[in-house]
Image (cartoon, grey):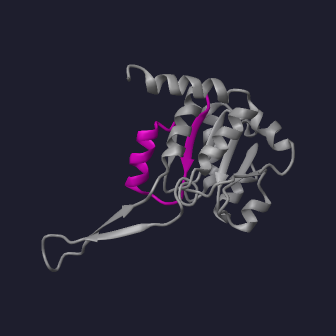
Amino acid sequence: MPKTSSAKARARRIRLLLFDVDGVLTDGKLFLFPVPTAGPADRPIVVEAKGFHAQDGAGISIARIAGLKTGLITRRSSETVALRARDLKLEHVHQGSQDKLKVFRQILVQEGLNRDEVAFVGDDVIDLPVMRNCGFSVAVANARHEVKAESHYVTPHAGGDGALRDVIEFILKAQGKWKQAVETYVGKENTGSN
């Protein structure tokens, strides 16, 4: 829920939506599966699995239609995340980022945006430096207390349960673009079917 009416005013200026992955795009759980290798003395390969919500993916497609760019900045590196990012056609994918604020500033320069035009969605204290420096900071419903306390908006849904979709809807509704973007998206999905 928005803390003040300024959340909508901040959302109106957003041209780029950035977000963390674990706890935002996912529910924060990491599933690591050892896969045995050929020899008994060999160490097993570890495969990582994460769950992503389809509504977040649809939201990113709707955001693209409305002209909103998207991207992720995460400390972890994961091929699973790389696959999902390619599937979603994210403009910015930064994994293994030990200094999220530095990456955020590089993106601003690359895009030619000022900080007021960028939103960031986080869930834990590692996200606070970027959240303190962007125009519209968002905490997911399952975020840590410190993160919620410093955000402009807290989503109704938890990370991995449609929280990113909540943010996209909030931004696009504040900009008056939601209805047309959804109609375009639905029209694309229904072309040639019946």
Say if residue 63 shows up in the picture.
yes
Residue 155, horizontal then vertical, whole percent: 69, 52
| Quarter the C terminus occupies | top left
From this viewpoint, which residue is outermost toward the left?
39
Q: Is residue 118 in the magenta section?
A: no
Say if residue 103 shows up in the picture.
no
Question: Which residue shows up at 50% across the image and 50% down it?
Answer: 53
Front position in the image: 113 or 144: 144
Q: Is residue 86 in the magenta section?
A: yes
Residue 147, horizontal then vertical, whole percent: 72, 62
The total of numbered circles placed on residues is 0
Task: Name above or below for residue 40 compared with residue 19.
Answer: below
42 relative to 193 in the view: left or right: left
Specify the segment rendered in magenta. 66-91
Residue 56, horizontal then vertical, whole percent: 54, 45
From this viewpoint, which residue is outermost toward the bottom?
41
Front position in the image: 86 or 115: 86
143 relative to 51 in the view: left or right: right
Task: Name above or below for residue 163 compared with residue 17.
Answer: below
From this viewpoint, which residue is outermost toward the right?
5
Residue 71, horizontal then vertical, whole percent: 55, 42
From this viewpoint, which residue is outermost toward the front?
194
Question: Which residue shows up at 41% across the image and 57% down it?
Answer: 78
Task: Name above or below for residue 194 compared with residue 115.
Answer: above
Question: Which quadrant of the figure has residue 150?
Answer: bottom right
